[in-house]
Amino acid sequence: MSTDQEYRYIGKGISRLDGLEKVTGSAQFVHDMAFPGMLYGKTVKSPHACARIVSIDISEAEKMPGVCAVLVGRELPYKVGIYMIDKDILAKGVARYQGEPVVAVAARSELAAEEACAKVKIVWEELPAVLDPREGLALAAPLVHPELASYSYMKGVFQPQPGTNISHHQKIRKGDAEKAIDQAEIVWKTQFYNPPVQHVAMETHTCIAHALPGSQARIWTSAQSPFTVRNLFSACFGIPHQNIRVHVPYVGGGFGGKAGIHLEPLAYLLSHKAGGRPVKLTMTREEEFGTIPSRQGLYSQFTTGATRDGKIVSLIATYIWDAGAYADYGVNVGRAASYSGAGPYEVPNCRIDSLVVYTNKVFGTAYRGFGHLEVLWGIERNMDIGARQLGLDPVEFRRRNVLRPGAKTITGETISEHTGRVDLCLEKVAEEIGWSGIQTEEERAQARDSGKLRGKGVALLHKAPAMPVFTSSAALLKFNENGSVDLLTSITDYGQGTYTALAQCAAEELKMPIERIHVPWESDTALTPFDWQTVASRGAFMGCKAVMAAARDALQQIKETAAQILRAPVGELVCRDEAVFVAHRPEERLSYREVVMGYSYANGNSIGGPVIGRGHYIAQGLTHLDLETGQGLPALDWTYGAHGVEIEVDLETGEITVLNLATALDVGQVLNAQSLRGQIIGGVVQGLGSALLEEFRFSPQGRLLNAGFVDYKIPTSKDLPRKMSQHMILTEQLDGPYGARGAAEHPMISIPGAIGNALCDALGIDFFELPLNAERVWLGIQRQRSVLQNTLPRAIMLPQAIKLPQTVHLDRGGG
Amino acid sequence: MLHEIPLYTISVEVNERTYTEKVPAQMTLLQFLRERLCLTGAKEGCGVGECGACTVLLNGKAVDACLVLAVEADQASVRTVEGEARDGELTLLQRAFIEHGAVQCGFCTSGMLLSAQSLLEKNPHPDQEEIVEAISGNLCRCTGYVQILEAIEAVALGREEGG
Ligand code: FES
Ligand code: FES
């Protein structure tokens, strides 16, 4: 399975290239940057979930010392958005979520800007808000965007439904799902909920914008995708691309939250109004929670049909996304999660309706795994519940249904031998946790006296990048005078290790030591080559492909010059150890250094010239999905995986301790063993945050109640599993670099499902809502006690809070 | 006209150099280091003492610099990440962080290093639990902590060679 080729760098645990700068504190983040004359921006935000702006009085704020500019929405005739252009830069007329910026100030210090903000007077008229997406679907619901029909959006991909709160309706139709359910021998129904959560990158969103004469703009931003910032900025203001220069230096974490455009337009407008002084706009941690987009919430429901011997025949799923006030990436999350929306299983008949619903809350965006953690929470719990209905072992039930070569996905893609082996991932984690089947009631009863119950669970995962069909990457390899190389890319490495992987790839291909490859840690849209976005676990895959092409190009240039000097045909030249030589006469050689800036003969005649290798890669063979059926080829590569966990639950406190957590991923090929391990552990622990700790809590009026680390906890060093292990399956991806496929997001996905399944094994209680914090688990235990004491038969306890949406018209025609 | 803000003269030793500066009463040690001395290695992750990104050593003790006022650091000695490596020679911890993959985005790294450094100076051979405890106030969203703990442990066990 694995390629037996010997690599010098690929697969090795090369330490990060940027380690030195980071451990010495010399790595500069936008957070650390300042320019002469720079001003600081601050905003006044809406205190209401939904309210009309009756009047704004900025007269006193303008007079405050140190204030250079005050902006209100009505002076800004611009709208911004990535897939749906629906957002004002400052709220105009109506504020749609608590935390939405309404007025902005630029002043000589942060304190002066804050003091000026405090002097702004706004009269509000509160309006009825949509706080639950299920209610937002009701025909009588207030509309978050009554102007939806007038917005531009990416046509042919998204389907907003004007006159409703639906910003996108993604449909998947395969076979006849209803009929197959009617005829199925066993049918079961389930419903689940994921709350909205935050990414919590340690560097909050920050940028510096400089409005320059002649409609020029320079931007330094803590962002993942410099070219997307530039493109959307250009679309927003009508400034041509070449006039906008976006710099991305070191970035303190992204996780999808910095994938698109955020504060840059506002900082630019402040700079413009302040007469062209640079303006820095940084979110406080509280604003990071309440103003900057988050991961949207999800209500999911499933009707599943199977044969008595455990073969799934049909799945009907409805996903209702709590997208918040603006579409941002949310519409694409709803889309991408649907084509993975049946899990890594062969489902012959499938119907999915994924509805992205506007609500009056902080809005959703991309977050590591892009909708997959959310849908797979339900899918993987649904599998365990189904196994119980069928009287089957949950591992065996999965075995009978996983995608195998020859199977067709729900969008009609045929799985091949090289797509990846989810079955092997499953077997590996089952073995690692010593899976021996679900406990019986008697076994649990025996253990109950100890006050602690143990349980085991598994969950599978899959994900393909969510990206447009034309997604591309480019790379340049620019030789220096001493024969070393600068590798230029506009992929952003905000921790994943992509740059180190690209350098390994360049060193491998150029046949030179990695120490001589240098990756400047700054992307600059004027100097580094185009790259679509750093999202979706595509960076190393597509970036390496571009670097490989660039290396071929550079070596060709080196050989062409060397061929003249060595008087040999290009085809007989070989490159190795930073030198080019004639294959059968290795002593006839030139070092790269002698060739890469041009070669001078003894008499002074010179040939060749600076070598710059150029390479690109574009996703191949992808198709748009049919709007009515969702059929097509959306996926560059599928990465499959599985987690197996063993947990212990304290019956008195409801607290869960993770004793063992094994992860298996089919990565195709390991590019860098150390960073892959880091990505897996980091992702798993982030997944544990979603599983056990994290959720936004809102007041009945839609106010965010936990916008800070005091009330919103993320995992610390004390929250780690007692044991964690990582296992790689290596099914070569034919078009992947060295056979590799993306793996940065996947470790986070399905951690909640694995824990939820283990919790059910331990307690015999089904939980349907996240997070599985001590409070929720404890309440579940108490509820079970009363059921047991009343000697009621144990049944699936459906969560009280989830009602079916009664007014969704799923067959409403496409928009 | 800006307000007349009363200023206080402080004298602080930072990374073995003494700085005498006039500062407003509300200026935090973190602001002082980052804005006045341009030592931006310590980061602000929350500003309220909940994340540890701003950790520095104040008289040898790890503190959240966002919670300390600059005037409180008068006559004190402060160590920041910029002062850890000597003559281009990394500390054992810094080297271990690189070698063990303990760094991803790097935003938490300086705080982590100083929390760990302070532990090892008090207690050169801590056990695992003590290491976990020492960095439990430092949030890291990228690494999942394991490689950070391994790096510190390697130094504690003397597996990281000097020189
Ligand atoms: S910035 Fe000081 S603890 Fe977070
Ligand atoms: S390495 Fe990114 S927060 Fe720790």
Image: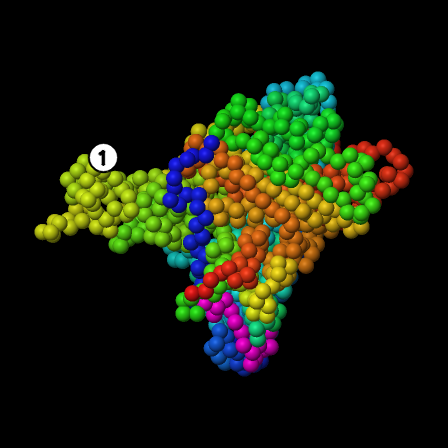
Q: Nearer the viewer, residue A386 or A326?
A: A386
For this orientation, the residue located farthest to the right is A790
Task: Report which residue position mark 1 lands on.
Answer: A571
Q: Nearer the viewer, residue A11 or A333?
A: A11
Q: Is residue A764 above or below residue A40?
A: above
Q: Is residue A180 magenta?
A: no
For this orientation, the residue located farthest to the left is A603
For this orientation, the residue located farthest to the front is B158
Q: Indicate the amino acid at tag 1.
A: Gly
Residue A136 at least partly seen:
no
Q: Which residues are magenta?
A: B69-85
Instruction: Give x and y (percent) for residue B71.
Output: 58, 78
Residue A703 at least partly seen:
yes
Instruction: Give x and y (percent) for residue A332.
Output: 56, 38
Please rate how many residues cluster around mark 1, counting C-alpha atoms within 10 Å: few if below 14, some from 14 to 19, many from 20. Answer: few
Residue at position x 65%, y 56% in the image: A718
Q: Nearer the viewer, residue A796 or B133?
A: B133
Residue at position x 52%, y 32% in the image: A420
Q: Is residue A533 above or below residue A207?
A: above
Q: Is residue B80 magenta?
A: yes
